[in-house]
Amino acid sequence: MIDTRHIGLQLPVVTFEVEKGRLRFFAEAIGETRPEYLDEEAARAAGYRSLPAPSTFLMGADFDAGTTTTLLETLGVPIERILHGEQSFTYHAPVCAGDVVSVEARISDIYSKKGGALEFIVKDSLIRDAQGKTVVEARGILVVRNPQEQEKSA
Amino acid sequence: MKIPHRDEVSVGQELPPLKLPPITRTTLALFAGASGDHNPVHIDIDFARAAGMPDVFAHGMLSMAYLGRFLTQWAPQTHLRHFSVRFAAITPVGARLTCTGKIAELTEHGNETLARLEIGVIDDKGEVKLAGEALVALA
C-alpha cells in the first residue's frame, strides 16, 4: 500500500521551455493537420505569438524533468503497474513556442479501492508563465494495479 | 478559423467526428519521444510482456491528444476553457479510433456562453476508450 503520509507532498518546481521543434514533432506524432500548429505564419494569422502548444502538450514538462519517475520511486510504485486513470486541464491563457513555463505540482490525494487492488494517486499542477500568472491548471489521476491484493481479498 | 456562434448551435448537436488511422508501433514510438512519456510499457514489447501484458499498448495521452485535435478542429484552442477525460480501456496496437462528441448543454459563465461537450474516443467495435467533457466559449 502507498503510504498516505505522501498526501500533500510538493514536487520540485519544474521549468520547461516550449520549443518550436518539439511542438512540430508533437504535432507530427498526433497527425495534426491544422496549419496554425504546423506553420508559424498560419499561427500568427490565427492570432498566436508563435506556434501554440496543443491542449495536452504541457504534460511533457514533468516527463522531461523526471518528476514522474522520481514520484513513483518516492511512493514505491513500479512503473509497469501504473495506468492513467483521469486527466483534466483548465485553460486561462495560450502557451506558445518561446514561452518558458514553470510547473508546480503536489500530491493532493492517495486512496484505494477493491481492498487495495487498485490505488489512486491524485496530482494537481499549476502551470505559470514567466510573469508568474497561472496559464493552465492540470489534474492527473494515476491508477496503481496491485493484482496480489485482489487475490487476497477474493 | 470560425468560432462557433451561440445562435448557430443547439443542445444535442453532434460535432464532426475525427477518424484516425490505425495505431501502429511507429505511432507509439513517435508519441513517446514527442510527449516525453518514455514508459517502456508503450514501446518495448519485452518490457510489456514481462509486466504481464500481451503487447505494448497506446499511451492514454495519445488518445487525449487526438481528442484535443477533434476539439480544435471545431473551435479555436483559445476558446477551449476546460478539457477532462477518464481513461476507460486500454488501446492496443492496430486499434482504429474515432473521436466523437455532442453539445450536452449551453451555459452562461461570467460574460461567456459556454458549450459543454460530451466527448469520447471509441474503437471500430464501439468500445469506449476515453470519455470526458470539454467547455468551449462560443462567439
Image: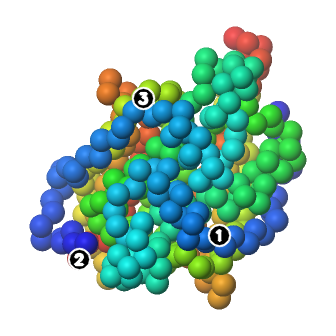
Q: Residues within 10 Å of mark 1 (few under 14, many from 20)?
A: many
Point out which mark residue A126 bears. 1
Q: Residue at x 45, y 34 (%)?
A: B23
Q: Residue at x 50, y 63 (%)?
A: A24
Circle nearer the viewer, 3 or 1: 3
Q: Amino acid at mark 1?
A: Leu
Can residue B94 be seen by looking at this rendering? yes
**Residue B93, how many percent across, how many down?**
50, 28
A146 and B31: which one is in front? B31
Instruction: Give the image's coloring scheme.
Output: rainbow
What whole-number distance in Å separates the C-alpha atoms at marks 3 and 1? 33 Å
Q: How many marks?
A: 3
Compared to residue B132, the image places residue B78 above or below, namely below
- Same subunit, tags 2 and 1: no
Q: Chain of mark 3?
A: B
Can residue B65 be seen by looking at this rendering? no
Q: Find disc 3 in the rendering and name its residue.
A: B95
Q: Going by the picture, which residue comes out furthest to the bottom? A: A131
B112 and A77: which one is in front? A77
**Residue B43, how many percent across, how many down?**
64, 34
Q: Chain of mark 1?
A: A
Query: What kind of element bears circle 2?
Result: loop
**Residue B125, how many percent across, how many down?**
32, 23
**Residue B115, how many percent across, how many down?**
28, 63
What whole-number distance in Å separates the C-alpha atoms at marks 2 and 3? 36 Å
Q: Find disc 2 in the rendering and name its residue.
A: B139
Q: Amino acid at mark 3?
A: Ala
